[in-house]
Image (cartoon, helix red, strand yellow):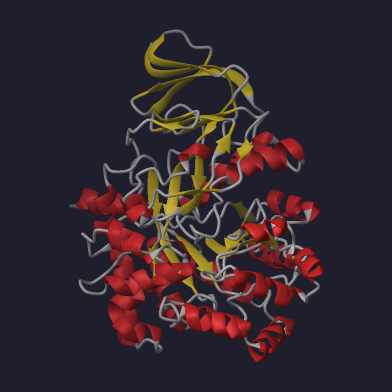
């Protein structure tokens, strides 16, 4: 048989969780044609002896809605074996939108997802109104496969305008929102996302629109999915309260659709919460409903300065200071009375996002030559070197450098045993790369390569086959991505070829590849040799091919509507 692509002698890890086996993989017309000991020739042959050949990874939690408009690969996704991305999470999407309302959506992306405003203004050329039209705009222009959820924030603002961030919706407005969700699902959306995180606000300090929605409104919108038996529901309700699980249970039972909730991870501030969350979600599955917790594979690292920072957003005094003009903010940081208020803020035990451990926060990059002696030191060590209180040392060093000092912080994922149990749980959806967001604070493109390198090879918390299943078919099954996630004949030829002995991720580094030359953090991979999308190699040993074989993956109702038309 003549193949378009023939992969020889690879260790096939097929995504099912079954043990790997050595075989050839033949690809033709964008699909897996045959798997086994194959004869024949091909336009391109890859020698995969000693390498794992797996289905391409599916990154289910991204914010690439804007980036894909100027970067068709969602860089650095393919470098880590990712062949499919799902965007539109946390209630944030660029559609539906009315003419003249575009900036209202930009305000949420700028603050919640920390995407530079000038990158959005330069890179997003608004050419759509409905969610389906937004997806149409991506057709034929992407290097990876793309699916999306419709965001509650955009839906609410489309109906209510600026009043969406000020009040409860009327019954009539809720019905109008339902109409937009129906339109989005029929236009190809894979589900709906919503956001009630109390820390999430717009650039102007107002809450994101979905935070004003009550349970009645949210149930009404999610009922659309139940009525049409299609789609997933992605939620972020804010602080990880156990009380939220009653809501997840009711939502999953009412809609009988998969509910995805954020997030399940080990936190230094609440070291036992992850266990309570697993115990709380188990009855939902036992009753026959689905509510998957999302989990990181790495500590949530943030690189920040006091010019631009979200680490302390749960603390009212700190948050308000970050909204001040920079000159006024510096004066406040230097004020002794303000510092006492900041200390009182940190003493409040209720906020959990920042651990308050100055022995973890460290100085990463300095501006002045005379301060280089502090590089790599924790704030606790900095304080001892300067004979100061940690908060004073932290603020004074930053002020000395005109708020240009870069700091490093990680808040979770530090307990190996806890993370092992979390990652192995059948109730957990591994991922949450947040690709396309927080681009000046962190880069977690490598959640999959970290899972394979750190958690499989080094810490052995699961087998290679289990990890690949978590990254592929587990996700495809939940999202209803037909024909993807398994390496089987007839399935799409989305493939990741890597060396299990070396696969991993590098530390993030700065790149100036966003619109207008704005900078962001990227993350390179190790040991990921080929990434193949619909039978076409798009990434080979760190190099991108320039080809755009990606497809827009739409839900089943889109196909029904298209067939009916």
Q: Is residue 474 above or below residue 391?
A: above
Rendered location of residue 439, percent (x, y)? 48, 57
Return the residue nearer the eye: 406 or 270: 406
| Rendering quarter of residue 532 | top left
Horizontal side of 400 relative to 82 (left or right) equals: right
Which quadrant would residue 14 be assigned to in this image? top right
Which quarter shows the N terminus?
Answer: top left
Q: Position of residue 302 (x, y in %)?
A: 60, 60
Nearest the eye: 127 or 555: 127
Tell me which residue sits at (25%, 64%) in the image: 130
Residue lying at the far left of the rendered structure = 565
Judge whether 396 appears above or below 470 on screen.
below
Q: Is residue 81 visible?
A: no
Residue 21 visible in image: yes
In the image, residue 48 above or below residue 72: above
Q: Is residue 372 left or right of residue 492?
A: right
- Residue at coordinates 43% horizontally, 43% vertically from top-left? 482
Point out residue 453 in the picture as x, y percentages from the top left corner: 67, 38
């Amino acid at each position: 048989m003549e193949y378009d692509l023939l992969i020889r002698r690879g260790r096939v890890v097929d995504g099912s969780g079954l043990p790997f086996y050595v075989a050839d993989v033949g690809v033709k017309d964008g699909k897996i044609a045959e798997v086994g000991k194959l004869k024949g020739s091909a336009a391109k042959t890859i020698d995969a002896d000693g390498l794992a050949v797996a289905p391409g990874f599916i990154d289910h939690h991204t914010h690439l809605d804007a980036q894909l408009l100027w970067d068709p690969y969602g860089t650095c996704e393919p470098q880590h074996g990712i062949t499919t991305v799902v965007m539109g999470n946390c209630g944030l999407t660029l559609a539906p939108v009315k003419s003249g309302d575009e900036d209202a959506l930009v305000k949420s992306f700028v603050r919640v997802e920390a995407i530079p405003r000038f990158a959005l203004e330069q890179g997003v050329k608004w050419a759509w109104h409905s969610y389906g039209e937004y997806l149409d705009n991506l057709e034929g222009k992407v290097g990876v496969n793309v699916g999306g959820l419709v965001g509650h924030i955009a839906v609410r603002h489309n109906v209510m305008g600026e009043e969406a961030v000020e009040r409860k919706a009327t019954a009539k407005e809720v019905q109008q929102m339902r109409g937009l969700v129906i339109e989005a699902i029929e236009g190809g959306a894979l589900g709906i996302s919503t956001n009630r995180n109390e820390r999430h606000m717009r650039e102007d300090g107002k809450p994101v629109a979905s935070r004003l929605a009550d349970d009645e409104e949210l149930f009404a919108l999610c009922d659309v999915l139940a009525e049409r038996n299609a789609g997933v529901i992605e939620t972020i309700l804010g602080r990880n309260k156990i009380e939220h699980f009653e809501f997840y249970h009711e939502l999953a039972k009412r809609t009988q659709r998969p509910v995805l909730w954020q997030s399940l991870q080990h936190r230094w501030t609440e070291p036992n919460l992850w266990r309570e969350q697993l115990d709380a979600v188990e009855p939902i599955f036992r009753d026959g409903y689905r509510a998957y917790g999302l989990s990181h594979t790495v500590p949530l690292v943030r690189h920040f300065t006091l010019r631009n920072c979200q680490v302390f957003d749960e603390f009212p005094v700190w948050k308000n200071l970050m909204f001040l003009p920079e000159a006024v903010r510096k004066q406040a940081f230097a004020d002794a009375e303000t510092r006492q208020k900041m200390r009182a803020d940190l003493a409040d035990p209720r906020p959990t996002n920042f651990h308050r451990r100055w022995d973890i926060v460290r100085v990463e990059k300095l501006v002045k030559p005379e301060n280089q002696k502090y590089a790599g030191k924790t704030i606790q060590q900095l304080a001892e070197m300067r004979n100061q209180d940690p908060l004073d040392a932290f603020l004074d060093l930053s002020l000395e450098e005109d708020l240009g000092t870069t700091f490093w912080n990680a808040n979770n994922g530090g307990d190996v045993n806890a993370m092992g149990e979390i990652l192995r749980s059948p109730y957990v959806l591994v991922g949450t790369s947040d690709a396309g967001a927080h681009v000046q604070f962190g880069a977690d493109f490598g959640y999959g390569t970290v899972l394979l390198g750190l958690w499989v090879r080094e810490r052995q918390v699961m087998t290679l086959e289990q990890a690949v299943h978590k990254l592929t078919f587990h996700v495809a099954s939940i999202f209803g991505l037909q024909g993807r996630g398994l390496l089987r004949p007839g399935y799409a030829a989305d493939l990741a070829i890597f060396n299990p002995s070396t696969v991993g991720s590098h530390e993030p580094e700065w790149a100036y590849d966003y619109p207008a030359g704005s900078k962001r953090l990227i993350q390179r991979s190790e040991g990921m040799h080929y990434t193949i999308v619909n039978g076409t190699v798009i990434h080979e040993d760190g190099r991108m091919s320039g080809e755009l074989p990606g497809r827009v993956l739409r839900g089943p109702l889109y196909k029904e509507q298209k067939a009916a038309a």
